[in-house]
Image: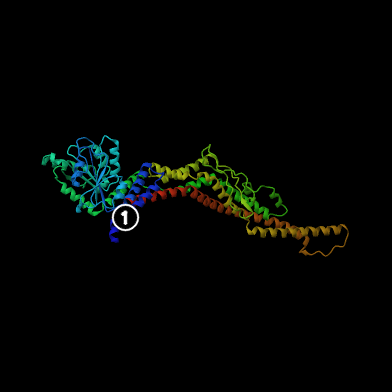
Amino acid sequence: MKLLRRKEGPSLDSRLAALFEAASLAEGRLAEEAVSGARAVAERAGARRDLSIDHTVAALAGATGSGKSSLYNALAGEDLAAVGVVRPTTSTAQAALWDGEGSGPLLDWLDIPQRHSTAPTPDLSGLILLDLPDHDSIRLSHRLEVDRLVGLVDLLVWVVDPQKYADAALHDRYLRPLAAHRDVMLVVLNQVDRLPAQAVERCLADLRRLLDEDGLAGVPVLAVSARTGAGLGELRSLLGDRVAHRRSWSTRLAADITTAATHLGGAAAEGGAGRAVGMDRALTGALYDAAGVPLVVEAVAKGHRHRAVVATGWPVTRWIRKLRPDPLRRLRIGATVPAGTRPSEPQAVLSTKPQGEPADEPSAERPPSASGAGIVGRTSVPAASAVQRAKVETAIRDVGEAAAAGLSGPWAAAVRQAARSRSGELADAVDRAVAMDSVRATRRPRWWRAVNVLQWLVFAAMLAGALWLGGLFAMDYLRLPQPPLPTVGVVPWPTVLLLGGALAGVLIALLSRLAAWAGGRRRARRTARALRTAIGQVSDELVLAPVRAELDRYARFTEAVDRALGGT
């Protein structure tokens, strides 16, 4: 049994759930008419599924004068509906019940107050036959009642007469739009007793042609006369067969779901959704330039050399370097704000908001600094130029356009809006990324401390030599006896310490500066890579992720529509 179900495709419940899901996902993306229509179909189908499935509701629908009520009485075996020359005769729908026990909730849902129990007939047990008002009635309430019940009943029996079977109102308003419901539809050519036999055949052939043009190939067409009883046996047999199978209700619901899902899918797109392939690199590059990263990278190299000179330079002259501003400090990179205080007002690096719109409020939270002493403030990188901002805006727009390719207007607009939805956060997020990833560039290499210790040792040796020579000079000036003076070859040790310390200090400073220059270049390259990666993550989070989420929503929508249509 399970194998048979797999072959037949998804269950009605799963198709209903898929239609609900598709309608929910399409909310705000597609025309409200298609979305609300699909949701109404799903709700209606769910309600019918929960009611009696042991009864089949068939409706006799037709135009004025087609003889619906006469046919209704003939099938019921008694005069239940009034038949007369004054039209329209039928003003409200009424039901004839064959073994109607348990059908009350179903008839209440259909809102059919007039109910008639017929004599028990085994071949029609479980049939609920409705006599509807005329669909072309001059009274609007009659037409609305027909439209309501045509959308609810399990089986549609269209009753036409030889004079009006080709009426455009019937074909354009009902038959053609219900092409997907061919499996729950019958067409009865009534009043054939008024025509010669050859004329009946011609009418049936012409009616068959019109139905084929409406997309209703295979729908049974019967020739019947309610007055003489011709064809009634065949009609009763066909109705009895549909009732016995107890599947007209599910077939009708499946057709409703197919129609609604087809409408949704047709409103969504002509083709598949695009992808913003390669757009991330262009966006990252635009943000990279607009955030002033090249300036920061240059400042990293210069700042590294500046701090290296301060840390490893000759102690006699390094204080001069301290008088110069640190390139990174000038950009407020590596600076910390004491804990418990609010950072200074941030300066926007870039903004994709149109002129005239208020700027985003600065966030009170800031990432922790590397040292943990406080929180890293915003950088003072110069604001992006108009050209750079335009490049960012163009890159964001290109992402949205590439991703929206192939989608319908409303859904494409939703994708483009998703690309811009968080663009107001870019300035703050990119600047934070620059500040945080640039902080690593301010970390002092370990060799700076070793060289600094060495410089002070050399300076101490030079100072010791200077003091030693000063003491010897004082003793000579006071004519005191000179102590023994050790030498290195012919050069006294005080002189070696003084001159050697000075030369060693200068040499170490020069070598350290050379190493700092090379280290600054390496650190600048690493910083550039890190900043590009960080900015790429920002652009992915604030621009590409919303686009991917919208495209994922569209993909789930198309999958739900496919499941609702009966796909696996």
The residue shown at (84%, 64%) is 483
Task: Tell me if residue 271 can be seen.
Answer: no
Question: Height in image: 482 above or below 250?
Answer: below
Report which quarter residue 70 is drawn in.
Answer: top left
From the top left corner, tell me how far across and down residue 177 is, in percent.
Answer: 28, 42
Residue at point 43%, 44% (across, down): 414
Q: Work out whether residue 347 or residue 95 is closer to the camera in this orientation and state it.
A: 95
Badge 1 element:
loop
Q: Is residue 426 at all visible to an observer of this figure? A: yes
Quarter of the image that includes the C terminus: bottom left
Residue 490: x percent and y percent? Answer: 77, 62
Locate residue 5, reporting x and y percent.
Answer: 29, 58
Quarter of the image with the N terminus in it: bottom left
Residue type, mark 1 in image:
Ser
Q: Is residue 387 left or right of residue 32?
A: right
Other-residue count near label 1 (Cα within 10 Å), few / some / many at <14 / 14–19 / ≥20? some
Q: How is the image coloured?
A: rainbow
**Image coordinates for residue 195, horizontal then vertical, percent:** 12, 39
Q: Which residue is mark 1?
A: 11
Tell me which residue sits at (87%, 62%) in the image: 481
Position of residue 409 relative to residue 238, above or below, is: above
Q: Which of these two is toward me, 305 or 484?
A: 305
